[in-house]
Image (cartoon, rainbow, N blue to C red):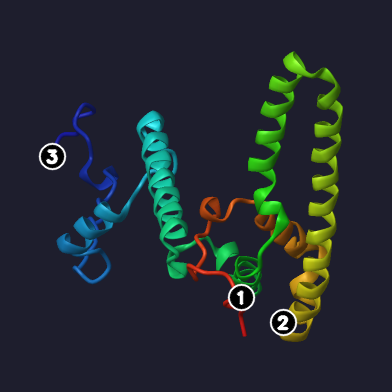
Amino acid sequence: MTWNPFKKDKASEPVKEPSKTRPSSTGKDRPTPKMKEAQARNLRPLVPTDRKASSKEAKARLRKKEDEEYEAMRTGDINRMPKAERLPWRVYIRDYVDARRNLGEFFIPVAVVILIGSVLVTTVMPALSLPMLVLMYVYLIAVVIDVAIMWRGLKKKLIAKYGEASVAKGSRSGSYAWSRAIQVRRWRLPKPRSPKRGNWPK
């Protein structure tokens, strides 16, 4: 046999190893099509694509909640009122103030009448404007004294029934009672549970 320098020797060729084919994965280590669809439905972007629409929807939900709470306060539905208005000592404060005849609830009408009267009197008898102004301040002082007496008795009842937490500084029970006592009864929110005065809470 003659040797051909241009012919490759078969012995010098690298031996090709048989390709190792990985076994096809079974369905156990990958989600089934139905699971993938469910996961795709549950995936939500952390940042909404349309921020303006998302903000509008959030405002609409908040406005709806506020409207429901206002309606509950107007109708007296305690279960749907804001959390602060459902506190037991606040319910007691409202019932106590509503059962009482407060001088402060007439302050706004009396003040309006005195102011209008003083303006009219000034054109006819200017000397009477000062006495009417003094009368309004006297009535205001009487309102402050009346509310202070009311809160003194109410505070003792709250402590005896609900403890010191009901009159603590963070509870704002004092300002809550004062603000309700100087409001006209029919304008109060939440609405008084009893239509008449004198029905004291137990």
Query: In screen coordinates, is 29 left or right of 169?
Result: left
- Give the residue at the far top of this rendering: 123
Mark 1 or mark 3, earlier in chain: 3
Is there CB contact under 8 Å for labels 1 and 2? yes
Residue at left offset 38%, top offset 43%: 45
Residue type, mark 2 in image:
Tyr
* Quarter containing the C terminus: bottom right
Q: Nearer the viewer, mark 3 or mark 2?
A: 2
Query: In screen coordinates, is 70 left or right of 49?
Result: right
Mark 1 or mark 2, earlier in chain: 1
Q: For mark 1, what is the residue?
A: 88
Residue type, mark 3 in image:
Met
Image x and y of residue 155, in percent:
79, 73
Q: For mark 2, what is the residue?
A: 162
Residue at left offset 66%, top offset 68%: 100
Residue type, mark 1 in image:
Pro
Q: For mark 3, what is the residue?
A: 1
Image x and y of residue 37, in percent:
19, 56
Relative to the observer, which residue lies in front, 179 or 168?
A: 179
